[in-house]
Amino acid sequence: VKSFDTLSYAKENKISIQMAARSLRYKWFYTIKKKYSFCYIATAHHHTDSVETVLINLIRGTGISGLHGINNLSDLIRPLLSFSKHDILNYAKKNAIVYREDSSNQDDKYIRNKVRNRIIPIMQEINPNVLNSIGSTITRLRDVERIYNQFIFEKKSSIISRIQNEYRINIEILLQEPSSKQILYEIISDFGFFDIDSVFNSLSSKSGKEFFNSDFYMVKDRRYLIISDYINNNNREVVSEEVRILKKHKLQFEVTQMNDYSYFIKQANLKLMHIDYDKLQFPLLIRPWQKGDSFIPLGMSGVKKVSDYFIDNKFSLIKKKKARLLISNHQIVCIIGERLDERFKLVQESKKIYIVKSL
């Protein structure tokens, strides 16, 4: 016999007691399956359970995926799904099998029990065959869902594109679709965004509307909704002289002697920035750009605002958000991975090189 502290688990994960019990139960099932190298987990869910699930989802609000009831999964099978609770009780009675039911199934404080004990009996008064009727509808809806999913898959391929670590939703193409709002929901829900009304309304607003969740950042740009990994805009990092790698920023630092000026000039690129070490004052600082920031872009003689540099180089809103500056004594050394400041470039007389490598 296995027991769990369901109440503590529910509180810790901020879920209902029923959901907590279900989660703990299945975790234990899969632990046993793995321990003994079993192929499947079989549960006793039946046809009536599946109908109850659909009704619960309708009460809570659901999309088409919530209307197909309980399914078999690759390693989780439900051999009794074709049989109603009534069928199972009759079989048990005929074969003198003791039928056991959890006593909590009679407690109407749980929504499933309210559906089972109150709502379904009223529905059966209207239509005694209601469970079979809903079951037939579920079967048809499963086929409809397959058609729907294929349609959405095809639309996604024409509306959303991936450029490096960004996903771009083409607003113009999206809005040409008659069901553009639903298509948008299917796209953004994959990234954990569910407030479809706010996101859809942003399509007709000016650029800059932002949406966040724990994993992703989404912003409305001129022609696109752009989604990327979550961006922490308060992300600052002090870099001491001894630091050689910053995993969080995917940066590597190296100090070396300059013995061949022309070689290092040729080797420099956006991901491998070469800086005159003796012009730096440690500790350095990595931070996001701020309004008013300015620097002298490599190859230029005049000061340029960072914001103007972004505009000239057609930075997307997300690329601006992700931009990080390397600072020495309140001066911008470089926009990391983009442009060095003229004041910190290598010259023939440079002795040591500070290399900033984007990993």
Image (cartoon, grey):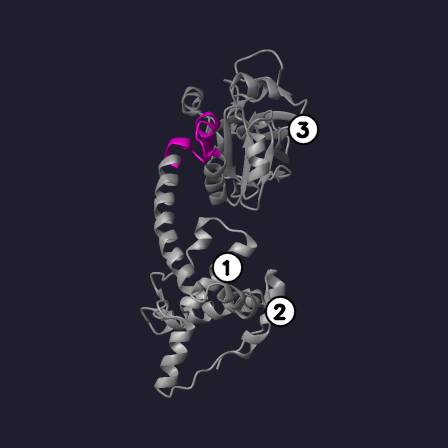
What amino acid does circle 2 point to? Lys
Look at the image and give the residue range highlighted in magenta: 156-180
Asked whether the beta carbons under mark 3 and mark 1 sit within 8 Å of each other, the answer is no
Report the mark closest to the observer, 1 or 2. 1
What amino acid does circle 3 point to? Asn
Query: In terms of secondary structure, where does tag 1 sit?
Result: helix
Check the image and report above or below for 295 versus 84: above
How many other residues sit within 10 Å of disc 2, few (<14), some (14-19) or many (≥20)? few
Is residue 252 shown to the viewer in this render? no
Query: In terms of secondary structure, where does tag 3 sit?
Result: loop
Check the image and report above or below for 307 versus 355: above
Check the image and report above or below for 248 versus 257: below
Check the image and report above or below for 200 versus 144: above
Residue furthest out toward the bottom: 96
Q: Which residue is mark 2?
A: 109
Is residue 79 shown to the viewer in this render? yes
Report the mark closest to the observer, 3 or 2. 2
In the rendered structure, find residue 329 and report the number of the disc placed on it: 3
What amino acid does circle 1 point to? Leu
Q: Which residue is mark 1?
A: 55
- Which residue is nearer to you in this view: 277 or 328? 328
C-alpha span from label 3 to label 2: 64 Å
Nearest to N terminus: mark 3 or mark 1: 1
Q: Position of residue 303 (x, y in %)?
A: 62, 14
- Which residue is nearer to you in this view: 353 or 106? 106
Residue furthest out toward the top: 301
